[in-house]
Image (spheres, helix red, strand yellow):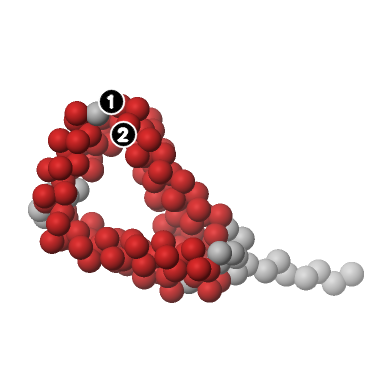
Amino acid sequence: MAPTALVFGVIIAVEGIIGLADPGGFAAMAYRVHTPPAIHFVAATRVLIGIIISGTSALSRVPRLMIGVGSFIALEGLLTPHFGRPFADMLGNWMAAETPEFVQLWAGGILLLGAAVIYAFIGVGYRMPRREL
């Protein structure tokens, strides 16, 4: 399961990189995924990612941090269907009113979250076979 958590960390980091490269497209994407029917898929995916990161936290380099990160992501996924549309409206208006640098700062936070997950799980659970001389 640690490789799965590592893959999710890479996906989160790539989302942050996309936001840094194209803040306008990132803001539009953030608005679109919080509207039906995509919101239910996003919510289920967030819950799955949170459960996998929390469940494999014992294998990571920083288990307490990964429990917190995974729990936060899963809770966010559970709340997404209930608050997703109002949040999307607020987020869309907020990001439209701000400068692209603000959106890039937001995306940079997402990139850092992905980098933290990658750091926690990279090289964990893999053993190089011992070579006999």
Give the left or right position of residue 71, taking residue 66 as reference. Answer: left
Residue matched to label 2:
103
Element at label 1: loop
- Which corner quadrant holds the C terminus? bottom right
Query: Considering only vertical position in the picture, is 44 above or below 15?
Result: below
Q: Eyeballing the image, is 11 above or below 24?
A: below
Can residue 22 be seen here?
no
The single residue placed furthest to the right in the displayed view is 133
Mark 1–mark 2 distance (CA, rounded to whole Å): 7 Å
Q: Are marks 1 and 2 in contact (CB under 8 Å)?
A: yes
In the image, what residue occupies the spot 45% across and 54% down?
9
Q: At numbered mark 2, what does the secondary structure look like: helix, strand or loop?
A: helix
Residue that appears at 16% across and 49% down? 87
Q: Please, what is the three-letter code of the amino acid marked with disc 1?
A: Thr
Report x, y in % for residue 84: 15, 54
* Left or right: 13 in relation to 62: left
Q: Which mark is residue 13?
A: none
